[in-house]
Amino acid sequence: MHYFTFSQRSIRNILAGGILLFSAASAQAQNVEPLHYTSFHTSTKPTIDGKLNEAVWQQAAWSQDFTDIEGDKRPQPPLRTRLKMLWDDQYLYVAAELEEPHIWGKLLLHDTIIFHDNDFELFIDPDGDGKEYFEIEVNARNTVFDLFMPRPYNEGGHALITWDTKGMKTAIGINGTLNKPADKDKSWTVEMAIPFKALRLLGVPDVPKDRSVWRINFSRVEWDTEIKGGQYVKKTNPATGKPLPEHNWVWSPQGVINMHVPQKWGYLQFSTQAVQKP
């Protein structure tokens, strides 16, 4: 997701053949302490089906609930979002649960700009140098947008959208009904298996070692919607006719409305200790 700190919470210019992204760092960015998560090793591969009821997932600890991207200066999100992680010698496994009374998704084409829907996103910098990192987005229809960033946008970086997370497995679970406004839903879940080989960087081993540390963060985009003609539509600003700014909820607060500041991401530590029920 691509955030900007101009007069509105975000400005996005989508052009044929690419994305023009302009960002300005906020001088008043809140100084927040990055969060930490320890991922334990598993000898049992979870089945990537969007269901998180397997014993191996029950043993993994949930993260802290997501907060607003700016941290404590904004109210706590009204809908709960949390995640957990595991790993083995092939994959980083990610599971997320997103509380949602109205589950919807419209985009179906791979590498469509998925944050135009409600979505779940992750950002990974394996060597933690603030450059050469990866972004993966997915909506409730399991449509994926993945890209590689040589460096952040405010350092002149450009998104390489042709990059794909080769071998990645993703699945969505719907605790309710998709795109049916007449009823009330409970939540949707995201399950991912991300191959370490797909994230190979020069000088970074394919497989983490015990106590390896990555920089990582997770984000949830949530749009304000209303029901018109039996469908979900984004609420608009009456003065402009444009959609209201999206809500940006994250695992580790950035202190600024910009996910593309890798130095503010949280820390993921890998442990070769076998996962045990918390």
Image (cartoon, grey):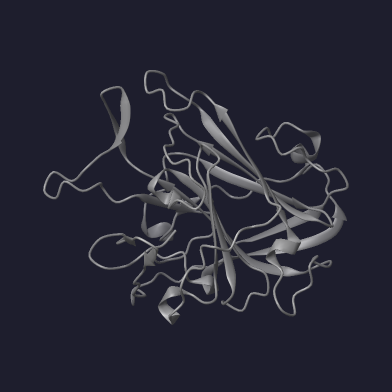
At horizontal 34% and vertical 66% (from top left) the residue drawn is: 4
Quadrant in the rendering for residue 103:
top left
Whole-percent x, y for residue 163 in the image:
58, 63
**96 and 61: which one is in front?**
96
Q: Is residue 113 left or right of residue 50?
A: left
At horizontal 71% and vertical 39% (from top left) the residue drawn is: 48
Quadrant of the drawing holding the C terminus = top right
Whole-percent x, y for residue 243 in the image:
25, 46
Quadrant in the rendering for residue 70:
bottom left
Q: Is residue 65 left or right of residue 256?
A: right
**194 and 220: which one is in front?**
194
Compared to 97, does 256 lie above or below?
A: below
Q: Is residue 49 left or right of residue 244?
A: right
Quadrant of the drawing holding the N terminus = bottom left
Compared to 125, does 84 lie above or below?
A: above
Compared to 150, does 165 lie above or below?
A: above
Q: Is residue 35 left or right of residue 43?
A: left
Report the residue that reaches farthest toward the top.
Answer: 182
Quadrant in the rendering for residue 171:
top right
At horizontal 40% and vertical 66% (from top left) the residue drawn is: 256
**195 and 3: which one is in front?**
195
Report the residue that reaches farthest toward the left.
Answer: 239
